[in-house]
Image (cartoon, rainbow, N blue to C red):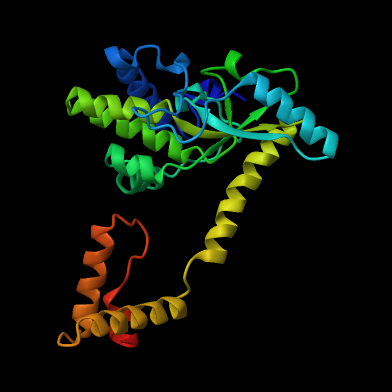
């Protein structure tokens, strides 16, 4: 199903209206005109690319090798984030959480430097016989779409603030050097379920790796002990631990690790 069918009456009609407006303003900008079909950046001294750009020839060889060994073909390479169709909903009819998008804008895309650090590889789904470079602007996004929306909305905000040319070039370089994992998927039904499972995988990883309250308490205690070993004349109170923790997290631009004063008062 294409989101265009859902624009005027669906649960996300306001979101998609805003998305259309943002994309129109982005592509109206001279630097981003035609951005949907621009080539991916090579790795070079003046680009932000960290992986080689997508190659159809390499993809064909990857597919052949994986299939021969009985594996699912996947290929990770650089690409343009705007090759993805932002209006194609592979799991339609589900309300998108705007608060999640806003949080991503502030935690991951506040500056081009932060975006370079925080952006995650996205997965796109390809059917047999399709060629990625012939689908620029129409690729199917398998990964959760909130990150794509957050980048688009933040870029719109950036353009509205009229930054200098160097910063705009940084944002364009980011868009053209996004790491993509291309997956060969047997059918549209399999694509639907792959989208659902990818989102679940992220949630499972969060549950597995995120600190429990007890783990965080031990982490805070260790943080206090380490600090006082380095600065033996400075014994931190509970309030001091909280202030030092928050200051250090802010300094290192970490989006996680929010800590309540109540937790520190109980545990320290």
In the image, residue 142 above or below residue 169: below
187 left or right of 145 in image: right
259 left or right of 69 in image: left
Q: Residue at x 38, y 32 (%)?
A: 48
| Picture mark count | 0
In the image, residue 231 above or below residue 257: below
Q: Is residue 75 visible?
A: yes
- Identify the image quadrant of residue 184: top right
178 left or right of 253 in image: right
Where residue 187 sits: x, y (%)? 76, 29
Where residue 141 sits: x, y (%)? 56, 32
Q: Is residue 187 visible?
A: no
In the image, residue 221 above or below residue 207: below
Quarter the C terminus occupies: bottom left
Q: Nearer the viewer, residue 258 or 224?
A: 224
Quarter the N terminus occupies: top right
Q: Residue at x 61, y 20 (%)?
A: 132
- Identify the image quadrant of residue 213: bottom left
Where residue 22 sits: x, y (%)? 33, 24
Q: Residue at x 34, y 32 (%)?
A: 153
- Identify the image quadrant of residue 115: top left
Where residue 122 sits: x, y (%)? 53, 37
Q: Nearer the viewer, residue 17 or 206?
A: 206
């Amino acid at each position: 199903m294409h989101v265009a069918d859902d624009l005027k009456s669906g649960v996300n009609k306001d979101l998609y209206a805003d998305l259309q407006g943002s994309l129109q303003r982005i592509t109206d900008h001279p630097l981003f005109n035609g951005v949907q079909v621009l080539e991916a950046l090579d790795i070079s001294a003046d680009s932000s690319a960290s992986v080689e750009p997508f190659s159809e020839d390499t993809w064909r060889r990857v597919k052949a090798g994986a299939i021969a060994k009985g594996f699912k073909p996947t290929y990770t390479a650089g690409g343009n984030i705007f090759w993805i169709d932002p209006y194609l909903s592979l799991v339609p009819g589900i309300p998108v959480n705007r608060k999640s998008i806003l949080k991503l804008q502030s935690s991951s895309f506040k500056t081009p430097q932060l975006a370079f650090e925080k952006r995650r590889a996205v997965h796109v789904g390809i059917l047999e016989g399709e060629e990625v470079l012939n689908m620029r602007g129409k690729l199917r996004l398998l990964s959760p779409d909130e990150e794509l929306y957050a980048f688009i909305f933040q870029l719109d905000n950036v353009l509205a603030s009229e930054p200098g040319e160097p910063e705009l070039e940084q944002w364009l370089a980011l868009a053209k050097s996004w790491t993509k994992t291309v997956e060969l998927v047997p059918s549209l039904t399999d694509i639907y379920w792959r989208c659902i499972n990818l989102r679940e995988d992220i949630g499972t990883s969060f549950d597995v790796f995120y600190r429990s309250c007890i783990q965080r308490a031990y982490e805070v205690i260790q943080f206090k002990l380490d600090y006082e070993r380095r600065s033996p004349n400075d014994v931190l109170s509970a309030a001091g631990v909280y202030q030092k923790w928050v200051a250090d997290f802010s300094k290192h631009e970490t989006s996680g690790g929010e800590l309540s004063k109540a937790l520190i008062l109980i545990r320290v």
